[in-house]
Image: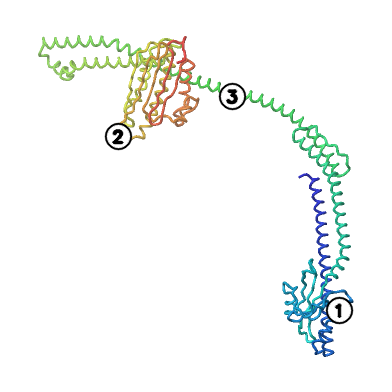
Amino acid sequence: MKIGQKMILGYLGIAALTGVVSAIAIRQQSDMARYLAQQEAQEVAGLVGYFTGHELDEHKLNSHDLLLAHLQSGVETLHSQRHRDMEIVDRNKIILADVTTQDIGTRLNEDPNNEVGKTIQDGIPRTYVEISPDYPHGIQLIAVPFKSEENEVLGAVIMEYTPLYQATMAIARHSITFTALISAGCGILALTVGYWLSRSISKPIQTLQKAVLDLADNKLDTRVDIQSQDELGELAHSFNKMVSDLQQSRAELIDANQQLQHEISDRRQAEAALKEALHDLQKTQSQMIQAEKMSSLGQLVAGVAHEINNPVNFIYGNLSHVRNYSDDLIRIVQLYQTHYPVPVSEIQAEIEEIDLAFLQEDLPKTLDSMKVGTNRIRQIVLSLRNFSRLDEAEFKPVDIHDGIDSTLLILQHRLKAKADRPEIQIVREYGELPQVECYAGQLNQVFMNILINALDALDDMNAKRSYQEIKEKPSKITIQTSLINSQWVEIAIADNGPGIPESIKQRIFDPFFTTKPIGKGTGMGMSISYQIITEKHNGKLHCISCPKTGTEFVIHIPIRQSVYPVI
């Protein structure tokens, strides 16, 4: 509801309140007129009863006829002087005196609620309305007890007070009319003043309200034109000044916001570039560390293999000559024993001292064992050289199976059973593969990282299992190779370990991510392996694992690096 409407309603309320007060005053004046008429009638009737009774006692009118005549005379005298109808009844409501003489001696019937009878019984004056064929609209009557000098109720005096009431109301009507006119005038004046005030106050307020709504809609060019010198004028001036300051502040804020946006954009670009540079630096650093590590390891392995290879080859090359020499010497000794069965005592003593029979039997066996050992050493050296591939820095066709077997030979100490851990079985399911173009040393490094992770997982699992559980489910690593098509090969390395949870599996190829204790893993092995397969060999490396079922790493690499379609 608007302010003007509220003000008009307020003044209407004042006018209505004035009307209500006037109505209450009119009602009070009407009641006062009725009260005064009743009081006058009651006093007149009481006086009639008193004086009539006093005169009766004074003249000792014991004759019933004289009593009735005296009462009738009093009634007629009052009627002639004040023009009031009056009648007197006894305790049985028999009319003793009346203006209408023919009703004397009859019973009062125009008393439907027995108001007169109640007055005779308790002596309390009562007013009531009598409706009869002669007075269809009713007349106002009052019943007053008719008492003796000893205050005994002899009957009742009934007097009409309608004329008195009408006279009193005639006087009150002038006051009522004047009051009503004043109330109506006050109401009209209140409405007029309210309308004028509402117009003079609400119109500027509506103007200010519209300006505020426009300002809320970002219309900063809004101004209020109120020229009054009152508080509304000051408010309009303050509003215009506020809008001007707000418009200026908004312009400054827009400029500052644009500048801040440019700075944020530049900073984001710089942060993105810095983040990318940091990622590249970490990646490069890890690659350099791993490359240096593998280079040092390759040089060490190659140096050890070279240093071992020379004496081993020397020993292996001379073993055949030593075997021939020993065979010749044994044959000479056997000839001496044939031709000189009884040697001199000194020779006989030496034969017994050196146990010549055992020497002749064991020496060929010892030379054969030495030959087997040197062959084993030569195989180990060859495996070390194949694993390091130090002399093969470029792509070269190699046998994948040789790289896997060389890696397994180096990890042989992790596979054998020891006092604190059971044996880990290796199942080879090799397919027919052609030679694959690759960085052999880097690919062997991938095999090494995957196999070491599998061995660590199986060792951790076995440390928590009982002997019976290990016997029922031995630890096992399965290596499968197959030819997918004429251009791709697949190498799958699977273990039957505890598996990898999904939350960890999504991060196993992230740099520096590891679940191993501090000092046992750097978190770079699988990241570098993923890089070697995907970037160096244009292949794919993915992990398949479920908890408690094991883990499988699947490698896809092209046979020829010149062509590698997506599979």
Residue type, mark 2 in image: Gln
Which class describes the residues within 10 Å of circle 3: few (<14), some (14-19), or many (20+)? few
- Which residue bears the numbered disc 3? 275
- Which residue bears the numbered disc 1? 76
Which class describes the residues within 10 Å of circle 2: few (<14), some (14-19), or many (20+)? few
> Mark 2 and mark 1 in contact (Cβ < 8 Å)?
no
Based on the displayed image, in which of its 4 quarters is residue 423 positioned?
top left
Residue type, mark 3 in image: Lys
x, y percent for residue 26: 83, 62
Q: Secondary structure at mark 3?
A: helix
> Mark 2 and mark 3 in contact (Cβ < 8 Å)?
no
Horizontally, is 549 left or right of 234 in the view?
left
Kindly report which numbered mark, 1 or 2, lies closer to the viewer in this rendering.
1
Of callouts 3 and 2, which one flags the residue occurring earlier in the amino acid sequence?
A: 3
Horizontally, is 292 left or right of 496 in the view?
right
* Quarter of the picture holding the N terminus: top right
Residue type, mark 1 in image: Glu
Horizontally, is 225 left or right of 94 in the view?
right
x, y percent for residue 67: 81, 86
Give the numbered dot on residue 365.
none
Give the numbered dot on residue 468.
2
Which class describes the residues within 10 Å of circle 1: few (<14), some (14-19), or many (20+)? many
Gap between marks 1 and 2 measured at Cα: 143 Å
x, y percent for residue 226: 86, 39
